[in-house]
Image (cartoon, rainbow, N blue to C red):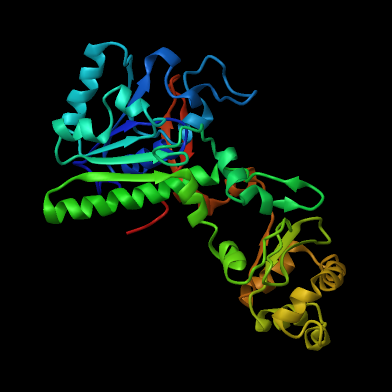
Amino acid sequence: MNHFFKNLKVVELANVLAGPAVGMFFSELGADVIKIENKLTGGDVTRSWKLPSEDVSSPVSAYYASVNWNKTSLFIDFNIKKERERVLEIIREADVVIVNYKPGDDKKWGMNYAALKKINPTIIYGQITGFGEKDKRTAFDLVLQAETGFMYMNGTPQSGPLKMPVAIIDLMAAHQLKEGILLAMMRKMKTGKGGKVSVSLFDAAVASLANQAANWLVANHNPQPIGSLHPNIAPYGEIFETIDHRKIVLAIGTDKQFKLLCEFFKSPKLSNKKEFYTNSSRVVHREKLAEILRLEFKKYSAVKIMKYCYEHDIPAGVVKSVAEVFENKETKSNLLTTVNAKKKKISVVKTVALKM
């Protein structure tokens, strides 16, 4: 499948995460992706977003590497007409252009859809904005998490609002734009016409509120910060420590799963108690239930509990660090290898998780 888009030419006029993630989707599937970077600023700003442990002399950071695999980078000074024309020559032969200019900058440099359509009538123009094409507010993922309810819901009453530890809004907008570009490609196959696809981080975030949006719109419940807990299901999200000090989370979705869990703890009567008999009653009495289960979990090892849960289809997981995730053999197929500027072999995670 990695040669699915072998003959596709993509020009990426985007930096940071959302736009480059779209470009990497196509590069992973075999497309020729040319990344245009600003020569005057040293290229994509994420090249300099380095951890204290990273080599300061390296031209790329781990962050940059995460979404720029197998692309060809060209450093361009758009103030120089000859260099702008070089970009236009590349776009003239391209199939897709990905941009994330601030509103107005695309027209300033002649890289807006109307201008590029004149030199390449069948171009597919994929655009990511922050708050829409007419709103000039600077839009970073953190700002969008704050403005669209994600930070308000995330965290606990004690912690206050917290952002997600990955730029989740950027990634959701990237997925939306991928879908839009693929739809435009399907339309082009039928009609021969290109087109423009535009996605804002704001719209992508609101579209992803999903059940939490419905909790407000349908049930008039304004979602509150409750940590990992699920407002509609219990036990779901509570963290339980085992005798060997591992932490396990449960995602009990049915009464049957809860009864099976109680059987493991040799407490079948627990599931028959009126206050825990149904999911609705467990949600109401979730704190009392959690205290009982915490005592039970401390009697067993994580291995023993997880083995039982696996054998009885009880949704449960061990809380793992990122380092532990990549110690798992199952993740090896999710990696791509490349070499950095110093010819050192490195690995990055695939952005394409599907298999065909």
Q: Is residue 186 left or right of residue 319?
A: left
Q: Position of residue 306 (x, y in %)?
A: 69, 67
Q: Is residue 233 above or below residue 38?
A: below
Q: Is residue 55 above or below residue 339?
A: above
Q: Position of residue 27 (x, y in %)?
A: 32, 39
Q: Is residue 166 visible?
A: yes
Quarter of the rendering containing residue 143 = top right
Quarter of the rendering containing residue 279 = bottom right
The structure residue drawn at horizontal position 34% and vertical position 53%, both measured from the top left corner, is 179
Q: Position of residue 273 (x, y in %)?
A: 82, 87
Q: Is residue 351 visible?
A: no
Q: Is residue 219 above or below residue 90?
A: below
Quadrant in which the C terminus appears: bottom left
Q: Who is closer to the viewer here, 204 or 347?
A: 204
The structure residue drawn at horizontal position 15% and vertical position 53%, both measured from the top left corner, is 189
Q: Position of residue 196 (x, y in %)?
A: 27, 44
Q: Who is closer to the viewer here, 254 or 320?
A: 254
